[in-house]
């Protein structure tokens, strides 16, 4: 019986501290009831099923002290936003570097040439860089592709 209890605790820890009752079929109802009386687990009714939640010394007797999945996801999302903002700035620097390589002696570059040099598709390039281009460069009509404004294609840029 003690082996089953240890096995159940290990299983629940591996699954993040909780599991549906259907995943615990190999454990008898007696073991679950006894562990619930000891305060090691808690049976929660979820919809039409039952969920077994681990309550041990590391959680101070309450599963509510653990960070929820939603809290963890919010934290991960905030860190990803920080990384992406840093990465976007790097992409803008890459765009400026490629512009310097591609521009002609008059300082004008074709957006198609910049996009091809960066190895991006139209679908990736224009949504990513259109605001950067519009705020840091002068737009000129012409070119096979570019930023469309008022039905006019602006495919040439100059600093």
Image (tube, helix red, strand yellow):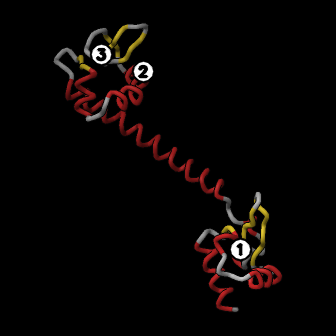
Q: Which residue is mark 1?
A: 54
Q: First in sequence, mark 3 or 2: give its number.
A: 2
The quarter of the picture where the N terminus appears is: bottom right
Tally of marks? 3
Q: Residue furthest left?
A: 105
Q: Nearer the viewer, residue 41 or 131?
A: 41
CB contact under 8 Å: marks 3 and 2: no
Q: Is residue 120 visible?
A: yes
Q: Which residue is mark 2?
A: 135
Task: Give the Cα separation between the discs numbered 3 and 2.
Answer: 15 Å
Residue 117 vertical placement versus 6 (above, below): above
Give the residue at x 74% y 84%: 31
Give the residue at x 67% y 61%: 67
Q: Nearer the viewer, residue 72 or 24?
A: 24
Task: Name the image quarter holding residue 104.
Answer: top left
Residue 38 vertical placement versus 134 (above, below): below
Q: Which residue is mark 3?
A: 155
The quarter of the picture where the C terminus appears is: top left
Q: Helix, strand or loop at disc 2?
A: helix
Q: Is residue 158 visible?
A: no
Residue 5 vertical placement versus 141 (above, below): below
Task: Give the Cα separation between the discs numbered 1 and 2.
Answer: 55 Å
Q: Helix, strand or loop at disc 1?
A: strand
Residue 37 location, x and y as percent?
Answer: 83, 82
Residue 29 location, x and y as percent?
Answer: 76, 81
Give the residue at x 61% y 57%: 72
Label 1: how many Cα within 10 Å (few below 14, some 14–19, many 20+): many
Q: Residue furthest right?
A: 37
Which label lies toward us, 3 or 2?
A: 3
Residue 48 location, x and y as percent?
Answer: 76, 60
Label 2: how many Cα within 10 Å (few below 14, some 14–19, many 20+): few
């Amino acid at each position: 019986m003690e082996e089953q209890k240890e096995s159940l605790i290990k299983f629940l820890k591996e699954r993040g501290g909780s599991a549906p009752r259907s995943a615990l079929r190999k454990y008898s109802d007696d073991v679950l009831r006894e562990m619930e009386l000891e305060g090691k687990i808690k049976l929660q009714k979820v919809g039409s099923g039952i969920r077994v939640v681990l309550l041990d010394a590391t959680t101070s007797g309450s599963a509510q002290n653990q960070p929820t999945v939603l809290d963890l996801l919010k934290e991960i999302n905030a860190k990803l936003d920080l990384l992406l903002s840093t990465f976007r700035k790097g992409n803008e620097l890459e765009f400026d570097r490629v512009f310097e390589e591609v521009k002609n002696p008059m300082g004008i570059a074709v957006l198609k040439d910049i996009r091809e040099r960066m190895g991006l598709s139209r679908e990736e390039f224009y949504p990513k860089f259109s605001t950067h281009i519009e705020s840091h460069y002068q737009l000129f009509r012409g070119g096979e592709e570019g930023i469309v404004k008022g039905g006019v294609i602006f495919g040439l840029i100059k600093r």
